[in-house]
Image (cartoon, grey):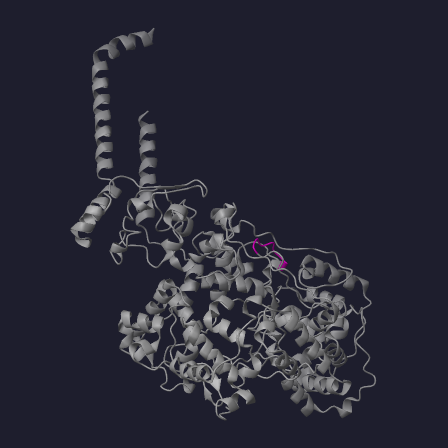
Amino acid sequence: MGVAVEVKTIAPPRLHLVFAGLGLAFLLIFSWVLFHEGTAEWRTTQARFRRLETTVKNPHQLAQSVSVAGLRQIWLPDLGRVDRCGTCHLGIDDPAFTGAPRPFAAHPGTWLSTHPTDRFGCTACHDGQGQATDYANAAHQPQPFVSRPMRPLETIEANCGACHRALDPPDAPRLAEGRRLIIEWGCFSCHDIPGFEGLTFRGPALDSIGYKVRPGWLSVWLGDPKSYLPQSRMGKFRLSPDEIANLQGFLLSQRAQAPLDNTGVDWKKADTANGRALFGELRCVSCHAVNGRGGTMGPELTRIGDKVRRPWLFSYLKDPHRVQPDTPMLRYRLTDDQLRDLTAFLYEEYSSAGAGPEPTPATYQDARLLAAGHAVFERRGCASCHQLAGTKDTGRIGPSLAGIADRDPDELPYGSNIVRHTTDNYIFLKVLLPDTLGQPSSMPTYGFTPADAAKIALALASIRKTDLPASYVLRRPAPVPYRPGGKFGELVTRYRCLSCHSVGGFGGDLSTVPLDRIGSQLQHDYVAKYLLNPGAVRVSVEARMPVFHMLPEEATSIADYFSTVFLDDSIEQYDTNFTAAETRRGEELYGQLGCEACHQLGTKGGYVGPELSASGARLKAGWIAAWLSTPQRYKPDTLQPDYGLSSTDVRALTAYLSSLGRRDAAKARGGDAR
Amino acid sequence: MRARASRAAAIMALALTTSVACRTGPPSQPGDPMLDAIRAEERQGDLSYVESQGKHLFLHYCATCHGDEARGDGQNASNLSPPPPDMTASKSILDATLLEKVITQGSAAVGRSPLSPPWGRSLSRQEIDYLVAYCQSLSRKKTQKP
């Protein structure tokens, strides 16, 4: 009743006012929308562009240019992207706008010719909000609630990595370095990391470690590997003293295989001077560093005497493959006396004064301690890197990193670090300081420099959750394992050729010379002689081929195999009937082109490239010609530039280089035997 | 009724002031440690991205003669006659066209010794642009040094 009365008294006279008010409100909103649209940021930007265009281009060009009006967008259904960046970045693919002010400047570099916008859009490389049409909403700068704002150029290579899956992607040095570090540090031993499948990282096998190391060293090592070896690739596991004691006892009880018998060795007769000479001759430093200098393939030897027991070292040098079947170390052909001298040298020269006498291998009988040590071993995932029979295969102990770049940054822990919440920063902190993110972490601390941690994080930030269409992805070529059989296979295994050289992309990269076409490059007799006493072909390269103490018949077998199997048919045949005029012309060209800047001839010249004094006795003519014509075809990042030589000039240079170091040819040139 | 309205107004005012305070308050800018780490390394000497890309190439292709800092003191420099110049002190690096010509066609193309080879066929256009940019940045470096 009361309601009816109210309606009667209020509604009829004021209804027209309500409608009038509403109408006015709609009109206002409508005109505001019109006004807002008319003065939208992108419209004013386009107006500015049209004004700029008249100053940048001449009337003829202006007549030809497409009129700019309205939103522009690129729709890439394959990538699930709609990019409207071109609405404001109007000069992006027009060279006339090179150096123009932002946002109209042409894209720097040649990126758009290799990554055309109609195929890649903008945000695939740069991130940001492609659908936005104003500066702020496009997330040029970090914005709240935008998980992927535009990447600064410093980290943009993370997005290169989404498509470029090669371990060494072109034009992306930071990404390449990050991926190299991931391989070097073996992150994929504990984490499943897409893109690193099939790679292995191995620490030493621990089956007989009780015979190998000194107990004191082991507890120091388990506490902090870097205190013994600053370059150690084992991280610091932040173990408690009890855990260290238990693990030490457990490991020292591992004595599966006794070292080779050395009872006949008279250590008193050891000649450390001879050991020192051998150490140099065997080129140990190509793989092992001493006092911070030398290779990194093997462990640094600066304090090896503090670490290992003498009988073990003798046995290991005699047959490293027996202790660790997958070691990259070769098995030298040395006599017991030589091994004794070398062992004694290493043992005495490379130990600190406080190492003390070698304790006898201790026997740990305390079952509780052993069980506790075993538990630590399994809990911390030691087996991810170290082989030890009788322990549970814990597989990859760390979480999978698949899709890590697309983790929600606001759900990740950052601990007490005051950082912007981004996936990048999370990965970076986790790599650098795994125990500071406010969560218990089993990940060891590796002691990376911030710069290295940033590159690793950058490489990991390229691992996205949803995979891209196959047509966009440049996959890493899977290396096909190369395992030759027979006598050659035995030699390759014994001398570990593939620790440094590669065949078909499989093997090491310490050497600059892959073996795939070695038979077409080098002369048979040269190879057979070189293997017996390898010298320095590249004067400035520190890592040199070891002197294997190989038997002459072994060297010949290898040379035979090279010259019949490792051939490149496209460079085999070359007419070597050079005329004296060709040789003379080659010598002239050698000077004119400035070859001496990098190559040594006699005592003159640089030592960037191989020395050429005896190139006629070393290289096959066909190879010289092929290499001079297209060096980058054979080695993309070589320091040998492509001079664009004519085939006549190539032939002349080949004639000249083939004559060097050959007596018959020297005579023909008039007795000038350089 | 009135009490409720005033309470609502008070809450509204509080919300407004807090939001304003948040917007205008002292910016407690959280850091970007990953970015800082890269900048600290790559932008030493104040290099832009393009210049730092050029530096990578320079270290690979050029430094063995020209030296890591382009001072003409690479490990191979002593074998060269004439030796490579100290680029940080050279006026030539101000001229981008000249730099590009030397890198692309070799030093012989500008009437100097043939010891610096032509890279035009071996490096991409992009890579040469990077190298030019890095070489030009060297002049800036020099003026900054005391």
- In the image, residue B4 lies at what x, y percent? 34, 28
Q: Quadrant of residue B118?
A: bottom left
Q: Residue at x 72, y 63 (%)?
A: A387
Instruction: Write the residue at 79% across / 62% down.
Output: A368
Task: Look at 59% across and 80% down and name the residue there.
Answer: A544
The residue stretch that appears in magenta: A189-195
Closer to us: A373 or A463:
A463
Residue at screen point 68% across, 61% down: A382
Question: In which image quadrant can residue A388 be found?
Answer: bottom right
Q: Nearer the viewer, residue A393 or A580?
A: A580
Label tally: 0
Q: Within the magenta stretch, is there residue A334? A: no
Q: Is residue A375 left or right of residue B13?
A: right
SS majority, magenta: loop
Place of residue A347 in the rendered image (x, y in percent of width and height, measured from the top left): 69, 84
Q: Is residue A449 above or below residue A348?
A: above
